[in-house]
Image (cartoon, rainbow, N blue to C red):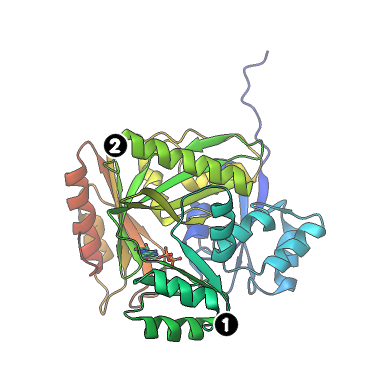
Amino acid sequence: MSNSPQLIVPVSVGVVGGGQLARMMGEAAHGAGVILTVLATSPDDAAVATCDATIIGAPSDHHSLDELADAVDVVTFDHELVDLDQVAALEANHVVVRPSAAALRFAVDKAHQRQSFERAGIAVPRFVVVTSNDDPALLSFLDAHRQVVVKAARGGYDGRGVLFPASRAEALAMVGDVARTTTVVVEERLELHGELAQLVVRSTSGAVVAYPLVATVQANGMCVEVRYPAGQKETVSGEALRLAIQIAELVDAVGVVAVELFLTERGLVVNEIALRPHNSGHWTIEGARTSQFANHLLAVSGRPLGPADPVHDAAVMVNVVGSDLPGSILLARAVSGAHVHDYGKTWRKGRKLGHVTAVGADAQAAHVTAWKSARAYGTTTREA
Ligand code: ADP
């Protein structure tokens, strides 16, 4: 046996979408043996600076998708606002797409997700799927549930497309409005005791690694903070892991599977899933032995996964969300122990512009450090 190091043949991966997730995939790519090409809508997109090559074009433009597919071995995604028919057409042309169009449908279409999970016996909020506000199923659902949430089945993210009507009349008006563009999911509004996220990564051989459960804190439908440890009993973390593995297998995912969970009176309920690196896993860059970005790329390029164990007792990640005025990234970086990630985006109110992670032995100290740095950076979201 020779002692010479094994040669790793890089795999060429293409990512559809040039946002911050693709940017952080770009940072992890070479470590995962991947050459990453991004399909970005503009040279100013966040991922262009970190990827090896860029193709400019819309993710919904089939010429641009074909150009990306021709240039790489495997296609993956940084968001789910994709046209599934176009993705299926790539597969029909023998392009390797991971996750597949069939798997992506679960993340793209909330109605399909809710209906499939319910059939599989996975706990989800009680719901009804409708295409108009005069559907008798909707009227009897509103009779049975005083408080509901109205969700666009497709096209929503960061709370856009999620509506909280104050009355039956408002619910009917909102359903009518949303139904003009997409199918509508109307579901019971649950009393939340907390929100959690369980990330697992599944390889092409079906092997799964799991990150520890985290707690997520939301403001106005947007995640503002993520905490490890989640502070839950083992019965809860065990159930979260069981659900995430069941879902990863049900959808036949390859790559990251992020499962957003509600903690309610009747236990854990699945809110939604994402089949890509997820905001609740950004802390893994500093906080775990292999980051979610590296593991996603290892998975989609057909490699064995890296260990997902945490390397510290605690980690806190705070999103930097644009407020009226930008703060100072230099002051944010000057906070000792703060790992500042800037997405290179133009400052805009309500936009996720970066994040800060603090890790260590003490969860409270990490919380204080991450928020101090994020506030210096200019975020004005409220600290929970
Ligand atoms: P998005 O797809 O835009 O991320 P979500 O479906 O995750 O939207 O909803 C955003 C937030 O709205 C959730 O994190 C939660 O705080 C709240 N929410 C969503 N659905 C419900 C529900 N059925 N009951 C109570 N709160 C909900």
Dot 2 amino acid type: Lys
- The answer to whether any part of residue 286 appears in the image is yes
Q: Is residue 20 above or below residue 202?
A: below
| Label 1 or label 2, whichever comes before in sequence order | 1
**Residue 93 location in percent, x, y?**
82, 59
Disc 1 crowd, CA 10 A, few/some/many (<14, 14-19, 20+)? few
Q: Position of residue 159 (x, y in %)?
A: 40, 70
Residue designated by label 1: 181
- The residues tagged by marks 1 and 2 sit, at their Cα atoms, a distance apart of 42 Å
Which residue corresponds to the image point at 53% horizontal and 84% vertical from the top-left? 134
Asked which secondary structure carries label 2, the reply is: loop
Q: Is residue 302 above or below residue 103?
A: above
Residue at image coords 62%, 17%: 3
Residue 117 drawn at (x, y percent): 55, 53
Which quadrant would the N terminus be assigned to in this image? top right
Camera-side residue: 105 or 358?
105
| Left or right: 272 as drawn, with respect to 88 | left
Which label was assigned to residue 97?
Answer: none
Asked whether 345 or 283 is in front, the reply is 283
Which residue is rendered at x = 27% and y = 74% of the image?
A: 326
Residue bearing the label numbered 2: 233
> Residue pushed farthest top?
1
274, 18: nearer the viewer: 274
Amino acid at circle 1 = Thr
